[in-house]
Amino acid sequence: MPTFIAAVRGVLAGMAAAAVLGAQAQTSDTRQQAFEAAAAAAKAVTVAGPSDIKLGDQAMLKLPAGMEYIPQPAAGRLMEAMGNSHDERLLGLVQGSGESPWLVVARYESAGYIKDDDAKEWNVDDLFKSLKEGTEEGNKRRKDMGFPPLEIVGWVQKPSYDAATHRLVWSMAARSEGETQEQQSVNYNTYALGREGYMTLNLITSRATIDRDKPAAHTLLAALQFNDGKRYEDFNSKTDKIAEYGLAALVAGVAAKKLGLIAVILAFAAKFAKVLLLAGAGAVAAFTKFFKRRDSA
């Protein structure tokens, strides 16, 4: 069976040959080399579950069996190699260790204590409008980097907040020009609120596989627990910082524009990150199926 790097090299060679991004050959080679180096570095430090993963000084993730964790700084290097900007909030990446090609991006935002009372009054139509506006603004950067624009097309799951556990879930689908519904990219976003900020576990997958993959996001969300003294319930109104925005801003509005929370993985990663992080022949098979699907679309 091919090694991890050999499998990645084969997939990237196929990408260049198929001219997926329509880029210059030299640019494609540079991207391939950068990703290959980042993938090798990530593989060297990957932690397999079951394991206890420290998320800074804030929380612990009980990584289940069948999942793998890529810590910083290897996670950041890999994300940047896939076209994403440097993100100081990034904690690491989680992926399935089997054939399932999902990827979860873990971040922590030290925003302060977020009041959640506005969840009772938010308007999902207004949130949707803000998300579209934020994505259109992000398209300016995608264009500068040579990637096609993305269009927000609708909710996969409308915002849902559990006041008892202080967990928020919402999901939106996006597409590039010419994509079918099954080919649409999906960010399935889950949040855990804490005393000093919040954790995000952002599942990157596709419209065709979201029903299969989203249980993994919920499993990870349930496996994340803030440390004693860092929990939402530990908030002290006399001493603690209160965030400048409320819960609705974690879906759209201020946080979407200021913090980039709707930064859907760029065209490169949205279609290939979940494939490229697989090891062995499964990666090549998944990549081949993808191109057959595009050719027939």
Image: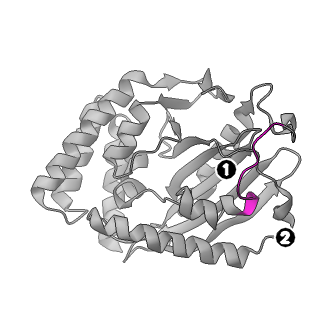
The residue shown at (50%, 23%) is 47
Rounded to the nearest angstrom, the CA distance separating label 2 from label 1 is 20 Å
The residue shown at (24%, 33%) is 6
Residue 267, image x, y percentages: 36, 61
Specify whether 12 is left or right of 173. Answer: left
Residue 130, image x, y percentages: 61, 73
Q: Quadrant of residue 46?
A: top left
- In the rendered structure, which segment of residues is drawn in magenta? 239-248
Of 48 and 60, nearer the camera is 60
Asked which secondary structure carries label 2, the reply is loop
Label whose residue precedes the other's in the sequence (2 or 1): 2
Specify whether 35 is left or right of 23. Answer: right
Of 204 and 261, nearer the camera is 261
Residue type for callout 2: Glu
Q: Is residue 278 visible?
A: no
Task: Work out which residue is located at the far left of the displayed protein and give it.
Answer: 26
Q: Main secondary structure of the magenta part?
A: loop
Report the mark closest to the observer, 2 or 1: 2
The residue shown at (68%, 62%) is 249
Is residue 242 magenta-colored?
yes
Residue 168, image x, y percentages: 74, 53
Mark 1 residue crowding within 10 angstroms, few (<14) / some (14–19) / many (20+): many
Query: In this figure, which residue is indicated by the disc labeled 2?
Result: 121
Query: In this figure, which residue is indicated by the disc labeled 1?
Result: 190
Specify whether 112 is left or right of 267. Answer: right
- Where is the C terminus found, in terms of image quarters? bottom left
